[in-house]
Image (cartoon, grey):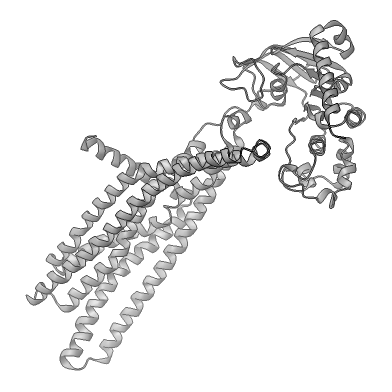
């Protein structure tokens, strides 16, 4: 790489770093400005303290040694100056630290909220293409990495002010000594630039590995039952250990460079102080400076050592912060994809549901398992459903059933065609019922609030009231993460009750009652017919007893509707349908026979 290209790259990194800091400072400018002003005052009073040292030495200490006495007023004046400057520096430090820390955490809160708000606004298809753990990392460790640079920034700006003021003061005091002290500043800046260049990509690499590790851990915990069932603990441990090892190696490389960098920062100021004392002694012997001036310059440069290291600390944090910032912006700058729910029109002829020539193709893998491998899942699907009907969608694996109901629910957008629904509320209950780790009440209400009477009424309709009353705290019983304390059938009934709380005009059940015994399933559907007579039910079904309860059956195969009608009529007219239902029945009987008593 040529020197011009390398210099351009460094300039670009610093420019991007400046833009990042400016963007975060604009989120909360008031506390940031207060912190910077506090740092600037600290810088001015630090330089002033060296002037006080010179004045006290030349007017109090030296006269006391030479004349044997010093005026009380002069001594008190020197003491007052020391106290005043010390207090001023202390106040400035408090202002800087408090408001810098406040700025950092306010920015962290804002960025976290921005990321979470962005994640919430993105539709289901967007989330399906990304790892949950990696997205969680963007709102957590990446935000922490990005804001880490905000706390030292005010001190860094104050240090620049201090360097400028101190350089001018030292050069005015003595040009030779001032030149020795000032000469070290560009050397330190070069060291900082070299460090930033060598460490930046290691921090980028480490932050990316951290996102991969977070995603892997999240996935492993999500599938803990599968891992345990197949004895794959060692495999998962090795897989995560490999990612963690890559993260460790990247961070170790960065830390090694940083350790060398900090050692150099320690050596250069120490050698400079030795040089100042040596040259200063010669200048003092020549009568060019006083003892107070030499002492004040050495004192000032000693005070500058730590602030100079803070500039290095800011530059050390900058690559780490930029790595986190880029990952945050990767989420917040991405356009919000169109929400499939907004593409759903409203029926005009009184139908509960109208599907017109809907086709759907996945770009890549098919998350629902539908399709035949070419990505085409639905082909020219058209149907109308009258209000209050119970419609069962039946078909073999990969026929497009789950994709169809997700399109109807507004979770996916059709590739072509249109969909129109009744203007009332729509609710979907998935085959895998998801429950939060809170109480039964929390899982039923979610963001809304209902009285107990409404909660129990929905539980009655879902045939869940009996087992909820038997729980230790009834509605206030904590169900555990993902409802771990409940059986599969209990979780499904709670999920169904949650949907019924909203009195939906269209209720979508994706094989929801598969974990219920036939009598409970029949009771649930009977409750729906009696209590929600105007509710239209569209359900994916694979149990013959469930299919027989439907007003109409839609038989799907190969992503298209092959037949529609009553269950009994389809059993007589459609051979493939009859064979499929008989296979369902045989599978149910085999499962029942093999189940433990």
Q: Residue at x 86, y 45 (%)?
A: 468
Give x and y (percent) for residue 220: 60, 40
> Quick check: 169 left or right of 369?
left
Task: Classify residue 436 by image quadrant.
Answer: top right
Q: Which residue is situated farthest in the left direction here?
A: 286
Q: Is residue 428 above or below residue 257?
A: above
* Whether residue 115 is visible: no
Position of the N terminus, as image quadrant, is top left
Position of the C terminus, as image quadrant, is top right
> Quick check: 429 left or right of 252?
right
Give x and y (percent) for residue 243: 49, 40
> Quick check: 285 left or right of 546?
left
Question: What is the count of numbered marks?
Answer: 0
494 and 483: which one is in front?
Answer: 483
586 and 268: which one is in front?
Answer: 586
Give x and y (percent) for residue 14: 33, 44
Q: Residue at x 87, y 26 (%)?
A: 534
Q: Residue at x 16, y 63 (%)?
A: 180
* Whether residue 333 is visible: yes
Q: Is residue 342 above or below residue 492?
A: above
Q: Is residue 556 above or below residue 495?
A: above
Q: Is residue 164 above or below residue 454?
A: below
246 and 401: which one is in front?
Answer: 246
Give x and y (percent) for residue 323: 42, 43
């Amino acid at each position: 790489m040529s020197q011009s290209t390398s210099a351009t790259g460094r300039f670009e990194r610093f420019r991007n770093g400046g833009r990042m800091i400016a963007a975060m400072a604009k989120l909360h400018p008031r506390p940031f400005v207060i912190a910077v002003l506090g740092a600037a005052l600290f810088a001015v009073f630090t330089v002033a303290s060296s002037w006080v040292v010179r004045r006290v030495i030349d007017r109090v200490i030296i006269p006391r040694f030479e004349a044997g006495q010093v005026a009380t007023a002069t001594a008190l004046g020197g003491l007052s100056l020391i106290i005043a400057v010390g207090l001023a520096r202390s106040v400035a430090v408090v202002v800087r630290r408090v408001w810098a820390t406040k700025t950092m955490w306010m920015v962290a809160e804002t960025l976290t909220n921005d990321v979470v708000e962005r994640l919430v606004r993105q539709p289901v298809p967007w989330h399906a293409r990304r790892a949950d753990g990696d997205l969680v990392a963007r709102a957590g460790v990446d935000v922490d990495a990005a804001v880490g640079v905000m706390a030292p920034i005010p001190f860094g700006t104050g240090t620049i002010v201090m360097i400028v003021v101190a350089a001018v003061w030292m050069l005015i005091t003595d040009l030779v000594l001032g030149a020795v002290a000032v000469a070290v500043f560009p050397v330190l800046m070069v060291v900082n630039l070299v460090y930033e260049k060598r460490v930046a990509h290691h921090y980028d690499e480490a932050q990316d590995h951290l996102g991969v590790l977070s995603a892997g851990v999240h996935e492993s915990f999500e599938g803990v039952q599968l891992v345990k069932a197949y004895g794959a603990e060692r495999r998962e441990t090795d897989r995560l250990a490999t990612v963690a090892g890559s993260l460790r190696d990247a961070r170790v490389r960065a830390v090694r460079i940083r350790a060398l960098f900090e050692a150099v920062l320690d050596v250069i100021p120490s050698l400079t102080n030795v040089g100042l004392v040596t040259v200063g002694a010669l200048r003092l012997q020549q009568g060019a400076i006083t003892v107070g001036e030499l002492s004040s310059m050495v004192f000032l440069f000693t005070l500058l050592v730590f602030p100079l290291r803070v500039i290095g600390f800011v530059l050390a944090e900058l690559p780490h912060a930029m790595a986190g910032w880029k990952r945050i912006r990767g989420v917040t700058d991405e356009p919000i994809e169109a929400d499939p729910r907004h593409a759903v029109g409203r029926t005009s002829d009184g139908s509960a549901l109208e599907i017109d020539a809907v086709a759907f193709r996945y770009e890549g893998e098919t998350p629902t398992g539908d399709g035949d491998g070419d990505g085409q899942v639905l082909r020219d699907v058209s149907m109308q459903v009258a209000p209050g009907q119970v419609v069962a969608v039946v078909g073999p694996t990969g026929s497009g059933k789950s994709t169809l109901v997700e399109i109807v629910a507004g979770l996916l957008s059709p590739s072509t065609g249109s969909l129109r629904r009744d203007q009332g509320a729509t609710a979907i209950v998935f085959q895998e019922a998801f429950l939060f780790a809170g109480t039964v009440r929390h899982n039923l209400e979610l963001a809304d609030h209902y009285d107990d009477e409404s909660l129990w009424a929905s539980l009655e309709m879902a045939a869940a009231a009996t087992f909820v009353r038997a729980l230790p705290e009834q509605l206030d019983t904590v169900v555990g993460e993902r409802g771990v304390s409940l059986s599969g059938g209990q979780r499904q009934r709670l999920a169904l009750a949650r949907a019924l709380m909203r009195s939906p005009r269209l209720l979508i059940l994706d094989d929801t009652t598969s974990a219920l015994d036939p009598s409970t399933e029949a009771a649930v559907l009977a409750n729906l017919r009696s209590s929600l007579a105007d509710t239209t039910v569209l359900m994916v079904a694979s149990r013959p007893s469930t299919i027989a309860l439907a007003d109409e059956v839609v038989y799907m195969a190969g992503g298209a509707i092959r037949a529609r009608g009553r269950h009994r009529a389809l059993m007589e007219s459609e051979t493939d349908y009859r064979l499929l239902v008989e296979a369902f029945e045989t599978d149910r009987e085999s499962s029942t026979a093999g189940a433990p008593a």
